[in-house]
Amino acid sequence: MRMRVEELAQAADVSVDTVRYYQKQRLLPPPQRDGRLALYTTEHLDRLARVKELQRRGFTLAVIRRFLAGDLDPADEHLAAAVAEAGDTEAAEELFDIDELVARCGIPTTILDALVREGLLVPRTHHGELRFSTADVGLVTNGLRLVEAGLPMPELLDLSRQHHAMTRAVATHAVELFDTHVRQPLRTTDLSEAERAERMVDAFRVLLPAVTDMVAHHFRRILLQVAQEHLEAVGEPTEIAAAINEGMPADAGPERPPERGHSTTDVLKAVQAG
């Protein structure tokens, strides 16, 4: 059976634009040609069904492309599924485009576009389009609160860029360690594919929260320590007392862990006041 692109799109329950987008992403083989007419077959229809099924499981188009090319073995497929599942915590949330984000945040599109370009605002990719959620609204809102507290926007963006670069470097190193010391050794064992996949997934599910907690805890501890040192150097007694009342310990060393319950925003406000 041969179909025009409109017929293929209708049979696959996708838009013509989606078909063409998948072709550009090398997820579909080239159509057959009858003169200037592009014709598609059941092979294209089956491939579209496979792409949609993998997208429903949360895989990115880059990973799907590797699946279709046969570059991932079964163990890697299970690991990729675990990564997708871990990054899909907002699956039940409403997704919307940048225009809706503008409406909800009251921020000009040009500023939000700049945040995305800089990697400071990380949208999800849904059917090839950038989409945002209420979590992104909260992120932008918290940034506005910092600006309202007195932090200049350029300096805040520069701070965010530094944080993004350092965080990405730590994340890259963590993933490389996992690949070198967990994934690669497991691939060379005599275990079955199912056993290798299970061990990889279990190890990843331990790594993700462990690294997340370690980095978050360390950043908060160091931020509190630096803030305390700053206040001790330049703050008035009333400011130091107010900071302590807000959860900043008198001694930010390891013997006196910071109290929980106050956000990084609160601490930054205290530092700005000093």
Image (spheres, rainbow, N blue to C red):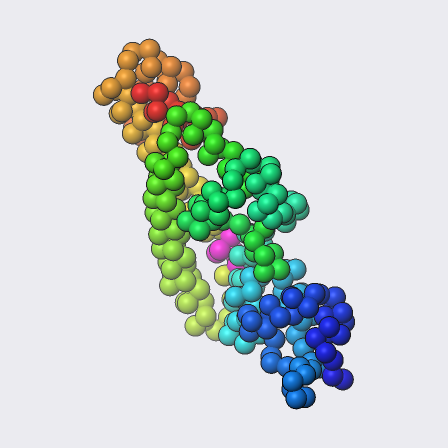
Horizontal side of 87 relative to 181 (left or right) equals right
Q: Residue furthest bottom?
A: 35
Horizontal side of 233 relative to 24 (left or right) equals left
Q: Residue furthest front?
A: 36
Q: Residue 221 location, x and y as percent? A: 35, 32
Q: Is residue 126 visible?
A: yes
Question: Foreground residue, 265 or 109?
Answer: 109
The answer to whether residue 268 is above or below residue 196 is above
Q: Residue at x 71, y 65 (%)?
A: 14
Question: Foreground residue, 162 or 130?
Answer: 130
Number of numbered discs on residues = 0
Instruction: Quarter of the image for the N terminus: give it.
Output: bottom right
Q: Residue at x 28, y 21 (%)?
A: 231
Horizontal side of 104 relative to 147 (left or right) equals right
The answer to whether residue 118 is above or below residue 71 is above
Q: Residue 103 location, x and y as percent? A: 60, 38
Q: Residue furthest top?
A: 238
Question: Foreground residue, 238 or 225?
Answer: 238
Instruction: Quarter of the image for the C terminus: give it.
Output: top left
Q: Which residues are magenta?
A: 201-205
Quarter-wise, where is residue 129 in the image? bottom right
Q: Main secondary structure of the magenta part?
A: helix
Q: Within the magenta stretch, is there residue 68? A: no
Q: Residue 161 location, x and y as percent? A: 37, 44
Q: Residue at x 60, y 79 (%)?
A: 29
Q: Is residue 255 visible?
A: no
Question: Foreground residue, 123 or 117?
Answer: 117
Q: Residue 180 location, x and y as percent? A: 37, 63
